[in-house]
Amino acid sequence: MSINKFNILKFNHHKNRNISLILGVLFFSVGIIDFYLNNYFNTNITSFLPRIINFFTPLIFGVIGLHLIRIEFSGIKILDSLNKNINTTNFNAALSVSIILLIIFGLPPLLNWLILDANFTGDSKEACTGGGACWVYIKVWFNRFMYGMYPNAEQWRVNLTFIAVLVFMAAGFFTPTRLRNYLSLYYVLILPIISFILIYFIVSGGSFGLVWVETGAWGGLSLTFMVSFFSLIFCFPLGMMLALGRRSNLPIVKYSSLSFIEFWRGVPLITVLFMSAVMFPMFLPDGTYIDKLIRVVVAITLFEAAYTAEVIRGGLQALPRGQYDAAKSLGMGYWRMHVFVILPQALKLVIPGIANTFLALIKDTPLIFVVGLLELVGMLNLAKTNPKWLGFSMEGYVFAGIIFWIICYSMSKYSQNLELKYKTDR
Amino acid sequence: MKLKKILPQLLTLLFIILVFGFFTMNAQENMGARGLEFGFGFLKTQASFDIQFSLIDYDGSHTYARAYLVGLLNTLLVAFIGIILATLLGAVIGVARLSPNYLIRKTASFYIEFFRNIPLLLQIFFWYFAALRALPMLEDAPMLLNSSFMTIKGLYTPAPIWTNFDVFFTTIIAAMIIIFFFARYAKKKQEQEGKRLPVFFISLAIFIFLPLLTFLIGGVDLSWSYPVIRQMSQSSYTFDGGLKIPPELIALTLALTLYTATFIAENVRAGIQGIGKGQKEAAASIGLTPNQVLKLVIMPQALRIIIPPTTNQYLNLTKNSSLAAAIAYPDLVLVFAGTAMMQTGRAIEIVGITMATYLTISLGISLLMNWYNKRIAIQEK
């Protein structure tokens, strides 16, 4: 027997079910319509009610409506699933109604701003007449947001390099089985070298008849990718060494790895970048100059390597002891054991963790504005101070937010999939 | 056999010594060339720069050491507010993610997926440069709750004016000590006699009424100074009295809270999901009420799962608060590693001190956590 706390409003289930249903739907719709009219047409159909109640009428009406249609085992499929999912108790009903009202309150203005009232055509500030967003701003500045101050005529070089690197990365998937054993060597050692050579000769230029473009002019989203790509590639082997070092039973190796890891994990990235910008030059012989971009990549690499090391250590610890014992009983030494038995299994375990580290790395790259490199967010801040385009900071941040969100969300979904995939294996 | 153990260690040591030696040598040479001498004596000299927002008394005539303290306190302030708000929000969202209500569940996961996948710096910029800039000017700001003004220049709220604040403060500490001993006594009593005292309500009563008592007999008094708008010239206005919370602080706290809460929410969800259904059923079957099940069985176990990763998030929040430098909130990084370093040119000392400060906070909390984890770990035999 169903127990309802207050049955005053509740009709007998079987006899008057339909009346209850109709009344409930009516109450609910009146609540919603009242709220809608209130917000968008400035008319108040319930203005005859006292003022304090008036403010809450949509909520109260909605809850009464949901209370009335909360009929158990009604036999109507939609109603049953509705009751089960959003309408189990009065408290739940109130929360559901609040969320529905919040959506009615927030969604239409958001859509208006983003799409309906927004301006898409034109090429100057004057084209933006509607009350919505001015996407013309993004259109005009698009090249800057993607390539920074890289000269327009030379941007094909950045594109070409990216495509080439992607092709080289994809090449790993199509290697013949004979060469599969060398795949990790390819990704850890050969691919970084190839990519570096490509970037050095094509993006930077200066030889083969290409104009030299200094790194200070690089920027935008392409710089975000470059910095995060190289940091990831370099921090992986370093993190692996540190993880092994931390688990070593040689005291000096163990404690130096430990202090290295704890040091980088204990300080914020922004101070590390400060260090690379102002403190590091003091540590070099007089007259040596290392490019800003390289210093940044090294700083981020060291920083992320510490986090990667902890992730990999987690994988090493998760391996059952039997794996170590088995490898040792076959007479394998430390390195053979790790390269052929331990690491291949451990690394497979930590792929999701590494993906998360990479995600954090991408989200950290905007910080390089500290040393004066302007990737996407930095370019936005520069563009919004342009006197011809004042007052469009909102559009810029929303645009960058969408781009970053798409990148990060798809990556996190991918890593969750990997996690599920590898979980079933064990 | 022995060589195998000594050689790698020797090589590591040699490598470390070489790197450090190389850097130290160069640093000495470079500083010598610039006429600088390594040392922390500059901390005692006059800073002669102003800081917009300070919790303690500070102006240009104070020393660099005091400027450092101002920066540190500002960092801790943001971290403290952020941690409290993020914990509350994260707990609510985390529980909401497990709600049987479809709408609430989806809203919570939408919130989490939305805010955790956008770089924190971008969020800070969004709140500071886009959202808070859309607020009204001082003279157009509507009054909120009959006392406060949310304007483009920040939030103006009533400021408390205390008399005999020290008496009040001492009473609060005394109340805490009394509660601590009371809780111990109650626990002992329960173990001996099996009687449960309503610890929570009695503690709450002590905590509220004891300090309130000081208003009656301790000579403590509280009045409020309300912000009042005043016209300075044709188009410039200012507020007299009240407390001004700068927009930098609001933007930073907002972004840090919303961002970190997503991670805390996931921790809370994982913690609650990590408790087996059998625990709940077993607790119910020995006759505990639903509230007791939650308080005595579920929460203690869930907290064991939730607390370690959440502390990690607190640390992240503290470290992320250094992004304040991007919107000119005078935190440790901006005041010390920014302004003070520009003025003195002492890159090594200042970046060193800044890093050491963060490192101390991080390692201190880590040690505390390790100790706590050991204490609450399930004692397996």
Image (spheres, helix red, strand yellow):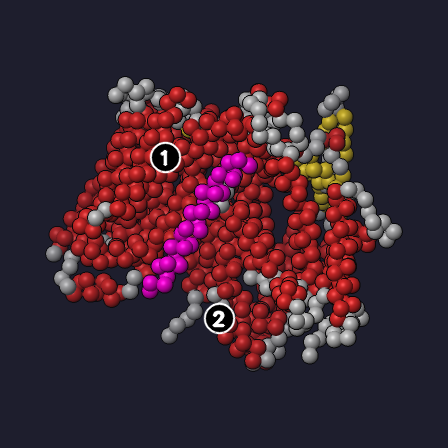
Type of amino acid at the residue the image marks with label 1? Met
Q: Position of residue A259 (x, y in %)?
A: 33, 47
Q: Position of residue B103 (x, y in %)?
A: 61, 57
Which residue is painted at 77% across and 59% down in the image? A26
The quadrant holding residue A15 is bottom right
Residue A57 seen by the camera: yes
* Residue at disc 2, secondary structure: loop
Residue found at the very far right of the displayed protein: A48
| Image quarter (top left, top right, bottom left or bottom right) of the N terminus of chain B | bottom left
Which residue is depicted at the point 17% across and 55% down? A336
Figure quadrant of the C terminus of chain B: bottom left
Q: Residue at x 29, y 28 (%)?
A: A200
Magenta stretch bounds? A398-426
Cα gap from disc 1 to disc 2, whole angstroms: 45 Å
Compared to residue B136, the image places residue B10 above or below, namely below
**Residue for point 81% across, 44% down:** A43
The lab-note entry on whether marks 1 and 2 share a chain reads: no
Q: Residues within 10 Å of mark 2 (few under 14, many from 20)?
A: few
**Position of residue B288 in the picture relative to residue B338 (left or right):** right
Give the chain letter at badge 1.
Answer: A
Q: Which residue is mark 2?
A: B276
Q: Count residues near mark 1 (Cα–Cα under 10 Å), then give few for <14, some for 14-19, many for 20+.
A: some
**Residue A363 coordinates in the image, percent (x, y):** 45, 41
Q: Nearer the viewer, residue B170 or B91?
A: B91
Q: Which residue is mark 1?
A: A226
Q: Determine if residue B56 is in view.
A: no
Of all chains, the one bearing label 2 is B
Kind of residue indicated by mark 2: Gly
Q: Are marks 1 and 2 in contact (CB under 8 Å)?
A: no
Q: Secondary structure at mark 1?
A: helix
Compared across the picture, whether B137 is left or right of B104 comes to: right
